[in-house]
Amino acid sequence: MSRIHLGLICVVGLFALGLTPAAAQTRFVATTGADSGTCVNVGSPCRTIQYAHGQAINSDTINIAAGTYSEAPRITKSVTLNGAGAPSTIIAPQLVNQLPGPPPTPANSSVIIDITGAVTVTIQNLTVRFPSGQYPAGGVSPINGIWATGGANLTVRSSTVTEIHDADVSGVQTGNCIRAGSTDRGPAGTVLIENNTISRCQKTGIIADRAGTVATIQGNTVIDGGLGERNSGGPRTQTVIAPNGVQVSSGASAAVNNNTVRRMQCELPTPQCGGNIDNDVSTASGILLFNVGAGTVVTNNTVETSDDAVAAFNPAGAIPVPLTANTLRNNRWRNVVGYSGTVVLSGNTLDGAQHGVLAVGFGEARQAIVDLNPANTAANANIIRNASINAIWIRNVRPTPGRNQQLPLSLDAESAAALAAAHLAAQAPTGLSPGPLVRGSSNQFITSGVAGLDNQPDEGTGNLACNWWGAATGPGTAGANPALISPGDTVSPFAINNVNYACPPGGPMLAVGITKTGPATAAPGAQITWIVTITNNGPADGAGSVFTDPVPAVITNVTWTCAASNGALCANPAGSGNNINQPLPVFPPGGQLIYTIVGTLPATPGQYINVATVTPSAIPGAVAVSATAVTAAAAVAIDTLSSFGWLLLLLGLAIIGVLALRQRAA
């Protein structure tokens, strides 16, 4: 008999006996309950989450009432843990030896909510924490708040995870608030972590780890990394670890979107922590991307007041990591660090920090590449501004044992070991990696303290043609960022604005057109009108150009008006006098100005020449252009009849001719 037939017989048999497969139910837990029965009566709740889980079947919901639950549930069924709200329902175990239920798995670790196996679990509307102020001198405290492994699918939403830390101090790479995947327990499955508050995690706020883990991390606030750590026997006074806000590592794929990450800082003095890549060992990161899987994207996040906002390190593969529309501001050392591998930046705003972007190699064979706006469109322009030292910094550092390998201690202990192995395997034969490369167009690098681009000494390549450097004349010139550029760098031609980043092949240009029209002839003493049209044909901004028109002195009663369109602006709407000299204060590409000039010719015949000129602003290659109008004034010898008069005269002559023909015919 086939399995299908056997299954049908079993189901029919159940119905024949009056039995049906068990339907999902809601089970209730409260601090006033008792661990007995099935927990399905809201009036008779169970006491612990672990007991309710034991009674549950797949797809059940466990409603957890307000209160504090000192336990560490082990979840092996597909259930929903639903609290009464993050401020109200709190899961906060004491030390490991005080935890009810089975011992932690693995034995040398501790997890508050441990999820493993082929299950689908949702955790929502509650708080997971290690009780504040408990910093044991020995033993093991919970070092993972929520941990999903073994292929488990996990959703965590609208919850708080906080105060997850180990008992030890400096150098401990544990204390993770939410973790999906690991080396020894395998990856998680599909993971959704959204709209949570993650704070005071000793090492990392959110980790997606190992190939097979596919995570969406969105709408979370991750703050105060490392601030749950014990220090010298009491509550911490400084962060003595390099924490990370969000980590995607070792083949995991993640969409990291719309999160806010703040205050991921290591406070150990140099050389343990700091911004000196030649000497310091470690630095913290708001978002750390280490050997990520295909499909990883980082979009619309805000990262601020951290050591490095985003650090991307991909020595094992050639998967580009896209960073799109993020705001990275007021971080301490760097806003973006590109180690080996490729990171692609589009539409980001990098504000502040010592360095806007650092591209650096530490001896890996894979080149560090930072692609800035590869689409080369104004809509995808990156803005890198207010760096206290350099907007772009390129370094290639020969590794020194125990020094200048900042990432190993930025990762959790497990990933740090993987990084050390990957770093060793990825070493270039010469011990010095290919020089880092920063490339891209249609970006703006402005208001840097030392340099818009620093590649001195020549340790890599900057291929940065057609970017806006704060002035159309490029870096290192008046009004623009300074520059420390090596002979191998390309920074010109320069964009001549930060609107459409127009950049003609020959460099910055400004082409101005001018026309002047007026009557070719006029009667002596007549009033005449000239029209002068000035157009900025681009691609540069023509602000600061000057229009002049010295009307001949014999022409009297000269007045003029100005009309502007397409974004241009008249310095004055009207004026009088023969010597017209007007600046063009706002004259963008496509802008147009029309001057209407009116005057009276002298009473004597003559030829009157009027030349109008526009002198462009001081942009290399821009030249003055002129337009001339010539008017001849001469006495008219014949009677001046109107057009209608001439028509009547011709009609009369025609009539006379017709009458004469009739008389001849008669």
Image (cartoon, rainbow, N blue to C red):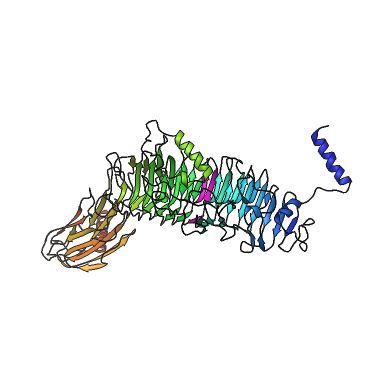
Which residue: 81% across, 38% down?
7
- Foreground of the two, 535 or 179: 179
- Write down the region rendered in magenta: 241-270
Residue at 51% from the left image edge and 48% from the top image edge: 172
Name of the residue lying farthest toward the top? 429
For the question of whether residue 170 can be seen, the reply is yes
Q: Quadrant of the C terminus?
A: bottom left
Q: Is residue 562 above or below residue 212?
A: below
Is 541 contained in the magenta span? no
Q: Is residue 117 left or right of residue 409?
A: right
Q: Which residue is drawn at the image coordinates 67% and 57% (left, top)?
A: 82
Examine the image and state in which quarter residue 514 appears.
bottom left
Question: Percent from the top left, x then y, of residue 279?
Answer: 37, 45
Residue 642 visible in the shown view: no
The picture places residue 269, in percent across and down from the top left corner, at: 40, 53
Q: Name the quarter where the N terminus is drawn.
A: top right
Residue 463: image location, x then y, percent: 34, 41
For this rendering, which residue is in front, 384 or 173? 173
Q: Residue furthest right?
A: 17
Which quadrant of the figure has residue 253? top right
Residue 323 place in picture, x, y as percent: 46, 47
Q: How many numbered badges does the structure rendering display?
A: 0
